[in-house]
Image (cartoon, rainbow, N blue to C red):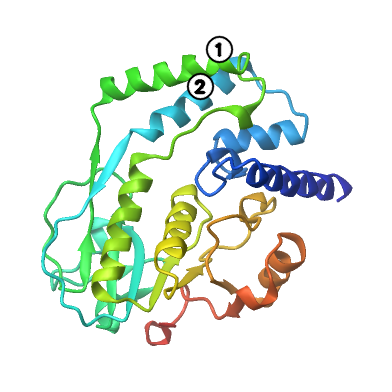
Amino acid sequence: MDQQFRILKKSKNFIKIGLSQKKNVEFNPNYFLTSWAESIGYLNIKLFFKTKISIIKKYKIILKEFFSIYRDKLEHEHRFVANNFENIIMSYFFPENLNKNGSYDDRYFSTNTNSNKKNLWILIPVSKNTNNYKTNNNIIILKRKKIHFFQNILFSLIIFFQNFLKIFFFSKNESIKFKNSIFSKNLSSIVINLIIKNKINKFIFPYEAQPHQHFLVSEIKKKIQKVKVIGYMHTVIPPLPLDYIKREGYPNLLLVNGITQKNILCEKLGWKKKDVKSIASLRYKSKSAFYF
C-alpha cells in the first residue's frame, strides 16, 4: 500500500511538472500513464517503480509511438445534417452492430441510436474503414484511412533519430518531442465543426482518458465554452488507475458506476466531487434506462 501511495504521488507530481513546463499534457503520450498497454506512459510507470526494461523493448515502444503520429487519419463526408439536434454522442464503431434499418446498437451506452432522435451520433471506426454505410440521419460514421506504410516508417525513423541524439539515447522520456497525431487533429476539427453548425448543448462520450479524447475536450473548452462535456466511465477503475488522474482535457462532468468509483476518483486521483456523478450502469441495464 505504501508503494502504491508513493507511485500515485510521483505520478501526480510528474503530470503537474509537465503542465508547468507546457509539455502539452492533454495529448502528450508521456502523461497517459496506462499500465494495461505497452506505451510511453507504461515506460514511465516502470521508471516510477524503478523496474528495469530492456533497451530493445524501450526503443521499440518509442518508435511505435512515433509511428502512431502519422499512422491514420479521419475523414467526414459533409452530407447535410438537419439542425434539430441537442446533443452529440461520440462513440466507437463496430460494423456488426449496424442494423438493416440504418440504426446502430452502441455497446458503450447499451442503447439504439433511434432511442432519442435529438442525439447526433458520431462513430469512430476502431480499425481501417473506407466503406459507405447506409445509416439514419442522426448517425455519422467517420472514415478511417491508413497513411502509406513505408512513408510513415520513414517519417518515424527520422523523428526517432532526431530525438535520439538530442536527449542522449532517450535518457528522459518526458523530453521526447511528441507531435499531436493526425488522427487526433482530424477528430477535433470534425467534432467542433459539427458542434458549431448544429448549436449543440452537450457533448457526450465514453471516457477512457486517452490522449485523443483529452485533446478533443481541451479544444472544445477553448473554442466553444457553452457546450457541456460529459464523459462516461463504462468500465471499472483498474487496480493501478494512474491513467485516470485528473489532467488537462478532463470533461466537465464524469459519470461513473457506483459511489466507490467516485470516492477513488475524488479522494485519490484529484477530481472534485461536483465534477463526478455516480449513476446506475448504462452498459449493463435495460434499454429503456438510457441517461440522455
Callout 1: few (<14), some (14-19), or many (20+) C-alpha neighbours within 10 Å? few
Callout 2: few (<14), some (14-19), or many (20+) C-alpha neighbours within 10 Å? few
Indicate the quadrant where residue 85 lies. Answer: bottom left
The C terminus, quarter of image? bottom left
Looking at the picture, how far across and down is residue 248, in whole percent?
A: 57, 55
Q: Residue at x 54, y 35 (%)?
A: 39
**Residue mark closest to the camera, 1 vs 2:** 1
Left or right: 35 as drawn, with respect to 71: right
Left or right: 42 as drawn, with respect to 128: right
Q: CA distance from mark 1 to mark 2?
A: 16 Å
- Count of number-bearing discs: 2
Looking at the picture, how far across and down is residue 288, in whole percent?
A: 38, 87
- Residue bearing the label numbered 2: 60
Q: Is residue 109 visible?
A: no
Q: Residue at x 73, y 71 (%)?
A: 263
Left or right: 138 as drawn, with respect to 94: left
Indicate the quadrant where residue 268 lies. Answer: bottom right
Task: Indicate the secondary structure of the residue bearing disc 2.
Answer: helix
Could you tell me the amino acid type at mark 1?
A: Leu
Judge whether 161 appears above or below 202 on screen.
above
Looking at the picture, how far across and down is residue 113, in whole percent?
A: 27, 75
Looking at the picture, how far across and down is residue 283, in whole percent?
A: 46, 72
- Residue 165 badge: 1
Could you tell me the amino acid type at mark 2?
A: Lys
Q: Is residue 229 visible?
A: yes
Q: Residue at x 57, y 80 (%)?
A: 279
Left or right: 119 as drawn, with respect to 240: left
Judge whether 118 appears above or below 254 on screen.
below
Q: In the orientation shown, which residue stands out farthest toward the bottom?
A: 288
Judge whether 9 appears above or below 252 on screen.
above
- Seen from the viewer's position, the closer of residues 157 and 26 is 26
Q: Residue at x 66, y 55 (%)?
A: 245
